[in-house]
Image (spheres, rainbow, N blue to C red):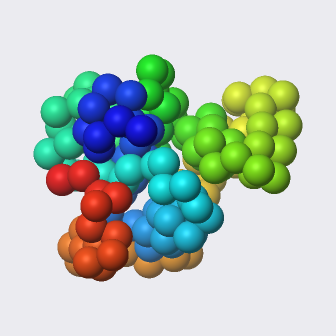
């Protein structure tokens, strides 16, 4: 596996203030048994250095860099789950649903995420055990 932050490391960029996003990252950490994924907030320096400004200014979407290509919204979420392997690959079946339908549902949740799941005052601080999975 490549070192974190290199061009081939899969990175999940997320809104560090969003309760839903943080919950998703917490689950990914538990489910990613091989610890392939790395995590960075959209508000952080890694996102600023590796993503175009339009991706870092829109905190309503998750951004996934799979090592070669960048994905957003529902495509990002599904591809992240697929990357976990095993039974999670089956989530790829939802990619047959047209993107405009998947993203309409995604956007509905994204618009209401702070109201439904809360908003933190500061970005997530990884535990000592998680620290190596997080990029600045």
Q: In the figure, residue 16 lies in which quadrant?
A: bottom left
Q: Relative to 40, is 107 on the left or the right?
A: right
Q: Residue at x 29, y 43 (%)?
A: 4
With respect to residue 106, does 20 lie above or below?
below
Place of residue 51 in the rendered image (x, y in percent of width and height, measured from the top left): 28, 30
Q: Nearer the viewer, residue 110 or 93?
A: 93
Quadrant where the N terminus sits is: top left
Q: Residue at x 55, y 75 (%)?
A: 116
Place of residue 7 in the rendered image (x, y in percent of width and height, measured from the top left): 32, 26
Q: What residue occupies the far front of the structure in this picture?
A: 1
| Count of numbered tags | 0
Q: Nearer the viewer, residue 128 or 82?
A: 128
Q: In the figure, residue 128 lies in which quadrant?
A: bottom left
Q: Relative to 110, is 78 on the left or the right?
A: right
Q: What residue occupies the far top of the structure in this picture?
A: 68
Place of residue 80 in the rendered image (x, y in percent of width and height, measured from the top left): 58, 45
Place of residue 14 in the rendered image (x, y in percent of width and height, measured from the top left): 39, 53
Q: Residue at x 43, y 33 (%)?
A: 65
Q: Is residue 77 visible?
A: yes
């Amino acid at each position: 596996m490549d070192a974190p932050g290199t061009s081939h490391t899969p990175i999940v960029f997320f809104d560090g203030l969003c309760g839903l996003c943080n919950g998703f990252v917490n689950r990914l950490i538990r489910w990613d048994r091989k610890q392939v994924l790395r995590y960075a907030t959209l508000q952080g320096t890694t996102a600023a250095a590796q993503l175009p400004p339009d991706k870092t200014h829109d905190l309503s979407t998750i951004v996934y860099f799979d090592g070669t290509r960048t994905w957003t919204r529902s495509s990002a979420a599904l591809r992240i789950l697929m990357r976990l392997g095993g039974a999670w690959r089956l989530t790829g079946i939802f990619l047959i649903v047209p993107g405009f339908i998947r993203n309409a549902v995604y956007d509905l949740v994204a618009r209401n995420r702070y109201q439904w799941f809360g908003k933190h005052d500061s970005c997530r601080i990884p535990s000592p055990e998680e620290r190596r999975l997080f990029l600045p």
